[in-house]
Image: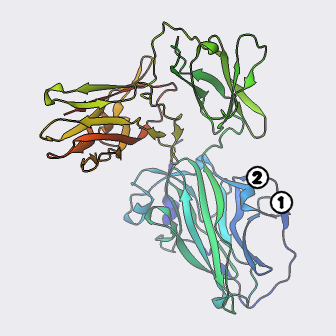
Amino acid sequence: MRARRLKRLAAAAGTVIATVGGLVVAVSGPASAQENVVLSAGHVDAVDVHYADGRLVLKVHDDTVQPSVSRDPGDVAFQVLPQAAVEVPDLPEYAFLGPAGSTVWLLPMTQDPNLLWPGWNTTRLPTGVFRGEKVSLSLVDVSGPGRVSVFMTDPVGQPLIKFRSDDGLPDAIDVPVGTHAHANWVFGALGSYTLTFRADATLTDGRQVSTGPVAYRFVVGDLPDPDPQVQLSIQGLQPAYAPGATVTLTAVQTPTSDLNRYRWFSKCPGTEEFTAVPGETSAAYSFTATNQLDDCQYLVRLYRDGEVVAAESGPATLNVDDAASPAPSQTITVTIDGTQGALVVSVDPNDRTVTLPAAVLSTAGDRWQSSGELRPVTVTDTRPGAPGWNVAGRLSDFTSGATRVGGKYLGWAPTVLAQANGQGVAAGQEVKPGFASGNGLAASSVLGSAPVGAGRGTARLGAGLNLELPTDTGAGQYTATLTLTAI
């Protein structure tokens, strides 16, 4: 659908604020509703300020139903329909919305019967209670995939910005008692947002009252499927394992959902039913292969709320063979430059597999993320003369079958875990993942170093690992090799 031009933002604005003063009308309060609803069209006072029993409270006044009802913000999702898409005009005063011609999603200040018309309201507040006959309304936080702006337009079409997420929050405005107002609500990207509002006021006796932060959920575009059909599979099982090898099984969802409650089950020869593995409730399950586990089967289940099974994998059978070679999912290979004498870099052969947790989408929804720790690297220097040294690492591409993903997407933050007195070892510089720019660990990067005149003794180096992959990376278990070079 082509986004329409944002011409109406420059149109003359009608009267959108009604302030009532000196008039008290006794009316019964609106009915209260507790069911969860999605509001996508019609009038709604999204931020409806109430005061009762000495407390300020934020509600949602839903005028899309008759009679209208008052709802708790936690029971409401505000939907910005796909047809709310517009193009940012090529006018400098609207540059805060994004580049000219780019698409944003607009709930307009003047009512469009096909879209939601949200506003804020203080007409239910009593007069004579608040100092200055006003409350302060703040947008204290925004989380979501794009920027959020709330603004009015003056009679000649100039924007009057009330709240804006991309230049620092909180933003606060004073709202007189008896105000009912509407504005343009603009979202910079499709997806789910949480807007956190707060109302504060000073009573006539000087006491401060506040609603505290209240979360409001907005969904821009189509609603996510509330009951996605997820297929579950087990990946990472090697054809055979030698006794003592580490087995890592990973549950993979297709397509990926928000569900994250797992339970692993096993069934070994001589038993008839699968039984739950105690304590194993994450997407990855690691254990040590033994001869007693040969021909054991494993499956994993994914759960919704409670004990409702959303998906179950097929069984995976473990093969433990004394003749098998260990096949770690990630292997650290060390290359030593022997011309410098007795400079030794080593990793524990039984602790050389780095298995990162299953990647999850970032808060902005623009990348897969995972993090973990490099297994310890030991550096021992017994050379005379203390010529100094450095240890650098370089990562190969990640592979999963025939699929390759660049090693640049992994970064690290090196640390010195331990060193001898006076050894003078320093950690290398942090290397960011090359998601947006740079080469990450695909380029040789220093893990640790010691200057000339120092370095003698034994040090242990480590690093926090940070992986950021594109969202179009295919499902699978990916393996890369980190080669360490000491000079």
Query: Which amino acid type is marked by label 2?
Result: Val
Residue 248 in picture, x, y percent from top left: 54, 25
Q: Quadrant of the N terminus?
A: top right
Q: Residue at x 62, y 75 (%)?
A: 15
Query: Which amino acid type is marked by label 1?
Result: Ala
Left or right, residue 382 beside residue 296:
left
Question: Are the residues at dot 2 and dot 1 in contact (C-beta closer than 8 Å)?
Answer: yes
Q: Regarding mark 2 in the picture, which secondary structure is present there? A: strand
Q: Is residue 394 above or below residue 91?
A: above
Mark identifier at residue 231:
none
User: CA gap, disc 2 to disc 1?
Assistant: 10 Å
Residue 440 in picture, x, y percent from top left: 32, 38
Q: Residue at x 82, y 64 (%)?
A: 68
Residue 344: name its quadrant.
top left
Q: Is residue 278 above or below residue 49?
A: above
How packed is label 2: few (under 14 Cα within 10 Å), some, or many (20 or more)? few
Residue 282: name its quadrant.
top right
Residue 384 in picture, x, y percent from top left: 14, 37
Q: Name the residue tied to disc 1.
A: 33
Q: Regarding mark 1 in the picture, which secondary structure is present there? A: strand
Q: Quadrant of the C terminus?
A: top left
Q: Name the residue tied to disc 2.
A: 37
